[in-house]
Image (cartoon, rainbow, N blue to C red):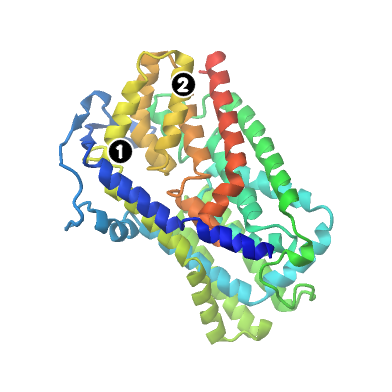
Amino acid sequence: MASEAGSNASSRMPDTYLILGAIALLVYGVSFLVDPGVFAVEEMLRDGRVVSLIEPDSFRSVPTGGLPLFASDGQPGLFNALYEGLVSGSRSGGAVGIIAFILVTGGAFGVVMATGAIDRGIGRIAGLCGDNSNLLLSSLFLVFSLSGAVFGMGEEVAPFVLMLLPVMRRLGYDGVTTVMVTYVATQIGFATSWMNPFSLAIAQGIAGLPLLSGMEFRLGLWLVFTLSGLLLTLHYAARHRAEPQQGLAVVTENLDAPLRHGDRWILAALFLTIAWLIWGVVAAGYYLPEIATQFAVLGILAGALGCFFRLNDLTANAAVEAFRRGAMDLLPAAMVVGFARGIVFLLGGDDPTAPSLLNTFLYHASAALGGLPAMLAAWLMLLGQSLFNFFVSSGSGQAALTMPLMAPLADLVGVSRQIAVLAFQLGDGLTNIAVPTSAGLMASLGAARVDWLQWLRASAVFLLVLLVLASVGILVASAVGYQ
């Protein structure tokens, strides 16, 4: 009865696709009321690399008369948004690259799961954890928070969600808990990082601040946010934990079977792939194309080993079918990434030199902060960055777009540039936990089989507490004159 009621409640809620469609219609309507705008940019050499900086006083409106329903040659149009969103961006970070990443990693883990090695390893882990599952949750949360803080893990977390989901369900935890100890932890680390090369370093460079400056205050924030996030996660996990025997969504017959020789080979390949991934991200600068390829290699090895050792009677055809099913299971999440990018496409994109509603919103938001008390202006910077993250969820992209305006504006309203960077960090990282335009969030929810609306209801208190902590952090930074 409970499950039936839950199903009926879910059916009354609008689908994620419908919500994104409504947002697209809203943008279409706004385009008739607000003119897009452009900025001029100046290229400068910072830390050995060329950085494009917006000239804050160069903004000008470009009247267009609103968006058409249909357009050609890649121009924005309401009905063009779906296709253009799906194919937008580069292979490294655009929608097309993220979609390929989701499908390839999903297919690879489909093969790994088909061997049964993960299932049989789960039985061993569950036996070892016993009543100490809180230790497992705490360790995972800390590791992923550090990953977000040190090397900016975000979209890359989706394969780990796929990997950990069966373990968590075997222990009685749901998909929401899995996302909390993985993706949410990375975003807490991302938002309070003292050394993130993908957002903090770029923002500080644009603001003219020494790299890694202000480290002590950020380390304190990281400790407070990580501990708070962990306690909230443990509280949610304890309230929603099922009996371990009932917690596995997909019942298998071999969870308590002993590990076979072939299982050990596949698990070894899995751990070696993780080590290879960490080395690649930290030392070699690997990103989505390389990471997807690493997991594709894992899928091929798992399929070959599964066939050789006859794990779960796996055959070559069955391995290919497992890849197909794994990719198919994540196709809805991949489509949401494209839909969300379509909204940014309707807005005109995130290029400051091209006519875009984003540029107009950014300009007027920055102008509204002039003349306000410093502490209030600092908090409104946090609020503005949080709202702006809905449209540009990329940390590096948001830094490049907003910091050239926020840094000089901070000087005008008596806020230190370090606080302006901190407002950007917190606003960018924490709202990635909720906004449907965050590719990392939607990929992680897809991997955990959690609907966005379900996630929003489950994480609302979590997000509210983090945003209150962020507000307190900004106010404290303003009170102590954080430099």
Secondary structure beneath disc 2? helix
Q: Is residue 434 above or below residue 133?
A: above
Residue that appears at 24% across and 42% down: 31
Residue that appears at 17% across and 58% down: 72
Q: How crowded is mark 1: few (under 14 residues within 10 Å), some or many (20 or more)?
A: many
Q: How crowded is mark 2: few (under 14 residues within 10 Å), some or many (20 or more)?
A: many
The answer to whether residue 280 is visible is no
Which residue was labeled with disc 2? Answer: 378
Q: Nearer the viewer, residue 159 or 295?
A: 159
Q: In which quarter of the image is residue 199?
A: top left
For marks 1 and 2, the one nearer the N-term is 1
Q: Quadrant of residue 243?
A: bottom right
**Residue 358, numbered label:** 1
Q: Which of 427 and 298 is in front in this view?
A: 427
Q: Give x and y (percent) for residue 304.
A: 58, 80
Q: Which of 213 and 108 is in front in this view?
A: 108
Q: Type of residue at label 2?
A: Ala
Residue that appears at 50% across and 18% down: 483
Q: In which quarter of the image is the N terminus?
A: bottom right
Q: Give x and y (percent) for residue 342.
A: 33, 53
Q: In this view, does 181 lie above or below 175?
A: above
